[in-house]
Image (cartoon, rainbow, N blue to C red):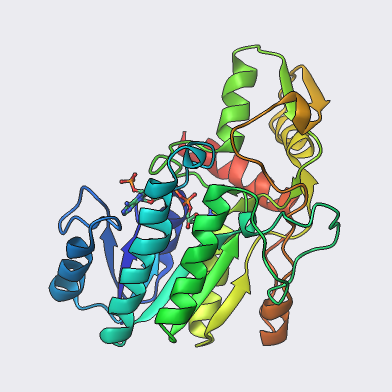
Amino acid sequence: MRYAVLGAAGQLGRDLCPRLPGEVIPLSRNGSPAVDLSRPESLLALFDNTRPDVVINCAAYNFVDRAESEPQEAFAVNAWGVRELARLCRERDCLLVHFSTDYVFGLDAARRQPWTESDAPGPVSVYGLSKLAGEYLVRMSCPRHLVIRTCGLYGVWGSGGKGGNFVETMLRLSSQGKPLRVVNDQTCTPSYTVDVAETTIALLNAGQLGLYHVTNSGSCTWYELTRTIFELSGVQASLTPIPSSEYPTPARRPTYSVLDHAALRALGISSPRPWREALAAYLRERQQKS
Ligand SMILES: NC(=O)c1ccc[n+]([C@@H]2O[C@H](COP(=O)([O-])OP(=O)(O)OC[C@H]3O[C@@H](n4cnc5c(N)ncnc54)[C@H](OP(=O)(O)O)[C@@H]3O)[C@@H](O)[C@H]2O)c1
């Protein structure tokens, strides 16, 4: 089995590639072949040059705030590039595995119950809307698909894409002795890319198609996550919970975007471990690598 992985240098791609059970072709915009979702001709070359059985799309335009002023760029990658990829997968009879986000939810601001795969999405940002469009374009254009929504990713290889991740940012700021004010009214499930990668492999091994939520278990706010990062790392820092109104950003975020794992449960696939355990594992792993 030959797997072509877009966004292979990103956080998730780096943890997924070594776990795939077959030949892996890691792809990036700077590699050979250079694959750019906003350049359809590079996608055609990808199929002609590598002839994959499975295409895994870990690539995305991920700049949530910048997307508000760059909707064309966000849609070029997350929607129209994905449509072309899905069309080519269908044409070449490839399975397409595509990653999406909890940010497809948020419009129902009163919601305080985990979202299932069958709940109607409703994004509150251009990024979320572009990713939702991408999901639908995959489902519409390529029947052999797995769409996997995940949330709050962090991984030790956070050097691709945006570079770094929330955990690293908090540790860096605390090491600079800065007092930290972190929002305490946005609840989600921070997720370790190793765990998301392993559950993705379980889904591939199960030979399943469709839409799945894959995150660590449980939930917390960004403030609670930060407090736990410092507790587990033995860091003393000045940390204050604040409402989102005191930290205005160009893009709105969902107040509550915890994802339920109903579709995983239906297949008898275990939910990834609780987020706190996963965070502890990440902190150990980054220490070993430093
Ligand atoms: N990060 C999160 O918290 C989060 C939360 C929910 C869902 N997700 C989703 O999970 C997936 C993986 O996210 P991640 O955190 O691993 O992302 P990441 O670390 O930011 O990596 C994204 C990758 O996409 C590539 N990329 C960007 N624009 C591209 C383009 N036009 N053509 C081809 N490749 C392009 C980047 O390549 P370069 O290295 O060349 O820049 C990078 O390798 C994405 O679908 C994302 O939307 C992420």
Residue 54 sits in which quadrant? bottom left
**Relative to residue 94, is residue 263 drawn left or right?**
right
Q: Residue furthest top?
A: 177
Residue 180 sits in which quadrant? top right
Which one is nearer the viewer's eye here, 273 or 33? 33
Residue 152 drawn at (x, y percent): 62, 49
Q: Quadrant of the N terminus?
A: bottom left
Residue occupying image coordinates x 73% and y 51%: 188
Residue occupying image coordinates x 48% and y 42%: 67
Which one is nearer the viewer's eye here, 17 or 283? 17
**Relative to residue 251, is residue 90 drawn left or right?**
left
> How many numbered discs sit on the rendered protein?
0
Image position of 96 with respect to 243: above or below: below
Residue 162 drawn at (x, y percent): 43, 39
Image position of 171 with respect to 201: above or below: above
**Relative to residue 148, is residue 261 drawn left or right?**
right
